[in-house]
Image (tube, rainbow, N blue to C red):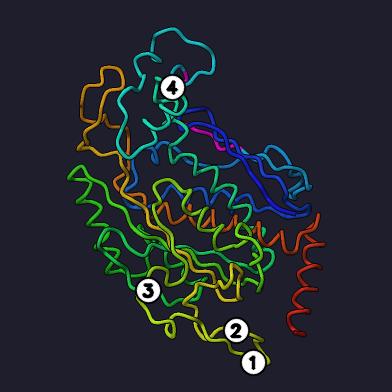
Amino acid sequence: MSLRYLTAGETHGPQLTAIIEGLPSNLELDFEALNFQLQRRQKGHGRGRRMQIETDTAQIVGGVRHGRTTGAPVALVVENKDWKHWTSVMNVEPIEGGDEAKRRVFRPRPGHADLNGGLKYNLKDLRNVLERSSARETAARVAVGAIARQLLGKFGIKVAGHVVSIGEVTAAAPNLPIDELIAVTEQSPVRVADKVAEQQMTELIDRMKAEGDTIGGVVECIVTGLPIGLGSHVQWDRKLDGRIAQAVMSINAFKGVEIGIGFEAGRTPGSKVHDEIMYSEERGFYRASNRLGGFEGGMTNGEPIVVRGVMKPIPTLYKPLASVDIDSKEPFTAQVERSDACAVPAASVVMEHVVAWEVANAFLEKFGGDSIEEIQANLDSYLRQIEAY
């Protein structure tokens, strides 16, 4: 049994839609917790005016009855409140001239999907590309991941995210239990537990905004409470760390990913990279350290998953870069669409949910059943097997 989902919708269309297939029956959903995760995505110092327009909530329109999943596909929608300003431009019906012609995009912005998408799909109005390639789509992915997060939570698995750095400002590594890390970073406008770095980050973001520029950073996701053996070594596409890496790289503007100490491993002797194996009656097999981020051979080893991703600066700048008009082929300075100065704190939330999705998928592949009760029985049997090994 495995999970899959599809999303549909445009940034200025009426709604984002997602359909999830593969959820077991009898998963009790917390709708307030689902919407809380969507609202977390909208927070963070440096966000633009769009976040003042939208207050994201997810409406479940299929696959759930009386608060519990039925085993059928779950369908959900997230309304775009900005749609009312774009009804003629984004109307599905044919329109001659008017706002559609006036708002045609024919000047591609560097760093966006505009030109590549226009050339690939033979579209002369680049709005048809930017409307779908927009990071607005991540609202649907957070909603999907929030449901996966609740599934994991039923089995004691927790997910947290925080900001490691913004620009050259790096926060001190938090040495906190996961519940405390979640609570502390939730109170921070840049999702860090380091108050000194928080002040420096907010000042940097403000300076970038004043200069018409943008700034990126690094975020980290931690997953605890995992059993040994999610993922597999037997095929390349069953390695869970590889699947998580692909999911993180699929987030808008992410340009790199690392597990555990990541690229530092290339500068470090092997004796200081690999995690020694220990055993006790209380814990069973465990590792003395977690430099490999909870993975060996593409499988979880019982330690927390630690994964980091790097987000480039948002490419929509208020001091535009050079580009070329697709009609005249003449140079111009790129037109400005509404933008954030920094979306790294929000990207941390998105990353939590794409990681949660991949972990939930691997969890169901290992312990899958048609109901929560069957999955619990499968997990309990496996844990007894591990204990007796």
Per the model, the C-alpha gap separating discs 4 and 2 is 55 Å
Amino acid at circle 3: Ala
Q: Residue at position x 61%, y 69% from top?
A: 299
Label 2: which residue?
286
In the rendered structure, which amino acid carries the disc numbered 2?
Answer: Tyr
Q: Which mark is residue 123?
A: 4
Can you name the residue that lies furthest to the top here?
A: 96
Comparing 238 with 200, the one in front is 238
Q: Is residue 155 left or right of residue 202?
A: right
Q: Which label was assigned to residue 173?
A: 3
Please indicate whether residue 21 sits to the left or right of residue 99 in the image.
Answer: right
Q: Is residue 28 magenta?
A: no
Residue 216, position as x, y percentages in the image: 31, 53
Alpha carbon separation for disc pair 4 and 1: 62 Å
Can you tell which of label 4 and label 2 is closer to the viewer? Answer: 4
Give whichever of 194, 103 is nearer the camera: 103
The residue under label 1 is which amino acid type?
Ser
Quadrant location of the N terminus in the rendered image: bottom right
